[in-house]
Amino acid sequence: MVIEAGNLFLGFADKAPEERFDCLLKTPGLRIERIVSTGQAGAPGGWYDQPQTEWVVLLSGTAVLRFEDEPAPRILRPGDWVTIPPHCRHRVEATDTREPSVWLAVHIEF
């Protein structure tokens, strides 16, 4: 038996040119990943359109998340979470430039 362990707040640079995506667990129908954003945002006008449900919680930093069908963006702070249904177009408009924004994302395929 292999027991894996780690710390969600260790093992990454406080500033990086790219967002970091670390897969923590992958099984059929489920993927859990840590995402570390250090000031990155999605491309202007670009949208994520995923085939699976995503549940995401912001653990540190701040972020601005926009959904195509909502009139205003959502400002996320540590502890804020959201469930994103399949094919719900969304994008990250901004992440904290002063400290890493650490996300925990759970992707679920039914």
Image: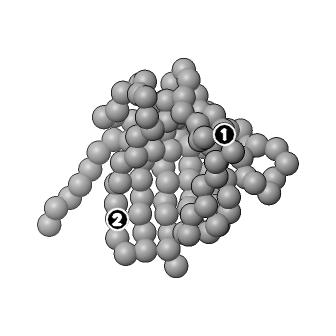
Whichever of labels 1 and 2 marks the residue nearer the N terminus, that label is: 2
Query: In this orientation, which residue lies closer to the viewer: 109 or 8?
Result: 109
In this rendering, would 88 be left or right of 51? right
| Quadrant location of the N terminus in the rendered image | bottom left
From the viewer's perspective, is the residue at label 1 or at label 2 nearer? Answer: 1
Query: In this orientation, which residue lies closer to the viewer: 100 or 45?
Result: 45
> Is residue 110 shown above or below 8?
below
Q: Local crowd at mark 1 within 10 Å, few (<14), some, or many (≥20)?
A: few
**Measured from the top left, where is residue 57 in percent x and y?**
56, 49
**Measured from the top left, where is residue 107 in percent x and y?**
49, 63
For label 2, the SS is strand
> Is residue 53 shown above or below 78?
below
Tell me the CA gap for discs 1 and 2: 30 Å
Does residue 110 show up? yes
Q: Which residue is mark 2?
A: 26
Amino acid at circle 2: Lys
For label 1, the SS is loop
Query: In this orientation, which residue lies closer to the viewer: 6 or 14?
Result: 14
In this rendering, would 35 be left or right of 10? right
Image-quadrant location for residue 48: bottom right
> Is residue 48 shown above or below 6?
below
Image-quadrant location for residue 32: bottom left
Q: Which mark is residue 44?
A: 1
Q: Local crowd at mark 2 within 10 Å, few (<14), some, or many (≥20)?
A: few
Image-quadrant location for residue 25: bottom left
Q: Which mark is residue 5?
A: none
Amino acid at circle 1: Pro
